[in-house]
């Protein structure tokens, strides 16, 4: 009788597991979590308990770079650093329906400067998911919000060495709260995803004050010609070499109520709270090694963007308001060399124009993929043009060499 009961529990568990697709292929044990589209090659280091009720997958990645800067009005200089060093843990406990994901960062640029009264930013992601079936992900914890495409993509899945100037200014990044994703992706027909989040609006690892506002985020993703191969909408470049054209169009909106920081989830502290609205529109096309991408981002506030120190009116800080466009094109040769070009333009709203210049950025890159995005060598040349409120301007240049490696 006991043996029969054990067999019954085993088969019930196997049936439950079959309803939740955890693995993509027999050699790739990536968890399909729409809020965590890390790019990985291979299967990392996986551990599963003998009773199959616990699973742990371990990955790491790092980016080492050296950059030569030629800034107008300054002496040329170079900078060498570990740009990113990440450790990722994910798996499930008790049942494949209950998943977890953790990502920690250790590089100085990831953690940021340690300041009195602020938390150290080692934790990037710490979230638990309930996944009742392949169409639904319900999460609670800290991770990326469903915002602009380039931010949702892992920094390890970029074609150039960094994201755009508009992503740096307008992204909504990580936050703590609840997320619900409804996924309907099919390779051979029209597909769509709906994603929503209710979060604190204050960014990651914030515990220094109670919050009196929340951020509401919603996103729609459309795939008119079917979903991309190997989740190709989550990494840049056509590494999968789509044999038929694939297109993605997406739009996202966030209202961050009573935000305390200049960029909502990011930036320095404001002297007064502000409610902000952010809009993101993205488009992507991939076909036989060619990839085209475009993005629009904007942030606004109905109140005065500039806030003043009540104890000293000469001190101020401001919400970063404005809009920007990004355009990116690339071709991957059969030799696994890829050429990439990108152009970004950023226009600042008039109420903060005296503090921030308009900006344009031109980038040209060459990437050699050794094991797809997980092991690659990148060279990039970038030019920045700044247009200040008083009619003056300047140009900066940098040349960068970077190696990314991970499992």
Image: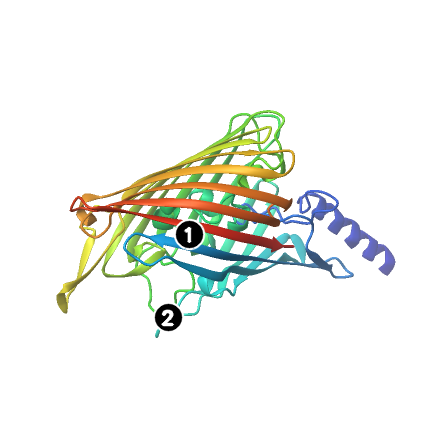
User: Residue most toward the front?
Assistant: 75
Q: Secondary structure at mark 1?
A: loop
Give the mark, 2 or 1, whose residue is nearer the N terminus: 2
Please, which colouring scheme is shown?
rainbow
Tell me the distance, in whole angstroms, between the alpha carbons under discs 2 and 1: 18 Å
Q: Position of residue 311 (x, y in %)?
A: 14, 69
Q: Position of residue 395 (x, y in %)?
A: 30, 46
Residue at screen point 71% across, 44% down? 18
Q: Position of residue 75 (x, y in %)?
A: 33, 59
Residue 134 occupies quadrant: top right
Q: Nearer the viewer, residue 362 or 250?
A: 362
Q: Secondary structure at mark 2?
A: loop
Residue at screen point 46% across, 44% down? 150
**What residue would you read off at disc 2?**
118
Residue at screen point 33% across, 62% down? 211
Residue 343 occupies quadrant: top left
Q: Quadrant of the C terminus?
A: bottom right
Residue 113 visible in the displayed image: yes
Q: Nearer the viewer, residue 133 or 405?
A: 405
Number of residues whose C-alpha sits closer than 10 Å to that of mark 2, classed few (under 14), some (14–19) or many (20 or more): few
**What residue would you read off at disc 1?**
173
Q: Give the side of residue 153 with respect to residue 93, left or right.
A: left
Q: Nearer the viewer, residue 180 or 39?
A: 39
Q: Give the side of residue 113 with respect to residue 74, left or right.
A: right
Residue 207 vs 240, above or below: the answer is below
Q: Quadrant of the N terminus?
A: bottom right
Residue 72 vs 186, above or below: the answer is below
């Amino acid at each position: 009788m006991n043996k029969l009961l054990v067999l019954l529990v085993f088969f019930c568990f196997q049936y439950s597991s079959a309803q939740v697709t955890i693995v993509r292929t027999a050699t790739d044990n990536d968890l399909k979590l729409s809020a965590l589209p890390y790019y990985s090659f291979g299967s990392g280091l996986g551990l599963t308990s003998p009773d199959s009720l616990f699973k742990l997958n371990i990955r790491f990645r790092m980016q080492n770079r050296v950059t030569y800067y030629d800034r107008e009005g300054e002496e040329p200089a170079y900078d060498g650093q570990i740009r990113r060093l990440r450790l990722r843990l994910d798996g499930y406990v008790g049942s494949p329906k209950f998943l977890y994901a953790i990502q920690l960062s250790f590089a100085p640029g990831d953690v940021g400067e340690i300041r009195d009264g602020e938390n150290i930013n080692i934790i990037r992601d710490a979230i638990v998911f309930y996944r009742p079936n392949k169409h639904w992900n319900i999460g609670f914890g800290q991770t990326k919000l469903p915002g602009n495409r380039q931010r949702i993509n892992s920094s390890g899945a970029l074609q150039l060495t960094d994201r755009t100037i508009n992503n740096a200014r307008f992204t909504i990044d990580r936050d703590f709260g609840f997320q619900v994703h409804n996924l309907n992706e099919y390779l051979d027909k029209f597909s769509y995803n709906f994603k929503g989040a209710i979060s604190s609006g204050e960014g990651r690892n914030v515990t220094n004050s109670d919050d009196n506002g929340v951020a509401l985020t919603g996103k729609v993703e459309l795939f008119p010609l079917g979903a991309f191969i190997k989740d190709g909408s989550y990494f840049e470049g056509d590494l999968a070499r789509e044999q038929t054209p694939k297109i993605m169009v997406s739009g996202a909106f966030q209202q961050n109520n009573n935000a305390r920081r200049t960029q909502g989830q990011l930036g320095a502290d404001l002297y007064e709270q502000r409610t902000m609205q952010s809009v993101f529109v993205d488009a992507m096309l991939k076909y036989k090694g060619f990839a085209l991408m475009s993005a629009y981002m904007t942030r606004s506030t109905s109140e005065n963007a500039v806030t003043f120190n009540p104890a000293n009116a000469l001190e101020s800080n401001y919400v970063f308001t404005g809009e920007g466009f990004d355009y990116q094109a690339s071709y991957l040769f059969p030799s696994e060399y890829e050429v990439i070009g990108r152009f970004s333009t950023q226009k600042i709203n008039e109420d903060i124009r005296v503090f921030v210049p308009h900006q344009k950025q031109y980038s040209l890159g060459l990437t050699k993929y050794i094991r797809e995005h997980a092991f690659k060598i990148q060279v990039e040349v970038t030019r920045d043009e700044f247009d200040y409120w008083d009619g003056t301007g300047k140009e900066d240049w940098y040349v960068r060499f970077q190696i990314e490696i991970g499992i």
